[in-house]
Amino acid sequence: MSIDDLRVSIDKIDDEILNLLNQRMEFVKKIGELKINSNTPIYRPEREKAILTRLKSNPQNTLSHKAIDAIYLEIFSVSRNLELPQKVAFLGPVGTYTHQAAQSRFGATSSYVAISSIEGVFRELSNKEAKYGVVPIENNTEGAVGATLDCLRKYENVKIVAEIYMDIHHSFASLSQNLSSINKIYSHPQGYNQCHNFLDDHTLTSVEFIPTKSTAQAALLASQDPNSAAICSKIAAYINKIPIMFEKIEDNLANKTRFFVLSDFKNIKSRCDKTSILALTAHRPGGLVELLNMFKDGGINLTKLESRPIKQKDFKTIFYIDFEGHIDDDNVNSVLKNASKNGHEITWLGSYLNQEGQE
């Protein structure tokens, strides 16, 4: 069989795929109408996860799990936008890792708005200017993002509806075709400092380093200078049309950031949920221990405990807590009610599909 014959076969399959996608979208439109009439959330992470799990379990798959995710996450995005156009606010500028995280979940067809601060993203959602927001919450080497924790307490109408774990890879991008002609390297100082081994190995430590406000800005500047390079995200290189010479150059290849997807609705229960709360413990000796023992007695596994100062009160601390389970689970509901009765102030931040270790 010739290449032309094979291409004819591929064309026929492409036509079939498109026809089936069109059929799928007709059902999506009908579901969208039902959701809008019943005031049901358009974004259903647990439903998308169930579809992906089912598709990846097919023993006849030629596609890898990563390939199936890439194809179907884009299909989900197109579907959601057919049901109701989506506007997503994220911590900018365009080309940041938060932008990359947002696009990994909401696809190419959603409408994106870059916001210059984390609180600005929360304000955008609180004022109903956007339906979804994406902000970083923690990095496995840098720790928690304090601004996000503060805003979760301040903006009570903004809830966590999903989490994204994303590997953070720095890329080396340049218009130049060889390293010897590069005389400047643009990057945010943090990004540059996380790539010392690569720079040493390729004798680039003597090349002039020009610090930038973000890796996104680094990519923009490198796109205007053929004898320079940028240490930046993959999406920043793509947006600025700079070829990537090396895709993963960071010293710590296990560098990972957790992001929150924010909105204004409550997820229904799934079989694998996580809940986030803020807890202001009763002001008495052993208050925190008492609260933690309530979770222990309720058989609830805590996955994160982070203290945060209450800036309006001298030396007062509030605790950010993640635990396994949904706010509507009987044991969770019982523990939180018991905590409130005993003088602990609990603020529910959201219950969402637990993605830890699955991204």
Image (cartoon, grey):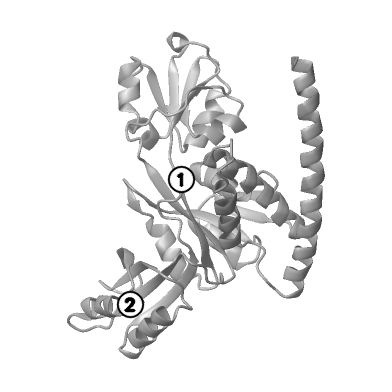
Tell me the SS state at disc 2.
strand
Q: Which image quarter: residue 309? A: bottom left
Disc 1 marks which residue?
Answer: 166
- Identify which residue, 144 or 355, lies in the foreground: 355
Residue shown at the point (30%, 25%) measured from the top left:
197
111 relative position to 94: left or right? right
307 relative position to 185: left or right? left
Q: How many numbered marks have been drawn onto this rendered protein structure?
A: 2
> Considering the image in quadrants, where does the N terminus appear?
top right
181 relative position to 47: left or right? left
Tell me the SS state at disc 1.
strand
Residue shown at the point (38%, 72%) measured from the top left:
278
Q: Nearer the viewer, mark 2 or mark 1?
A: 1
Q: Confirm whether residue 310 shows in the render.
A: no
Q: Amino acid at mark 1?
A: Met
First in residue order: circle 2 vs circle 1:
1
Q: Of all residues shown, which one is farthest toward the left? A: 285
Q: Confirm whether residue 4 shows in the render.
A: yes
Residue 339 to residue 39: above or below: below
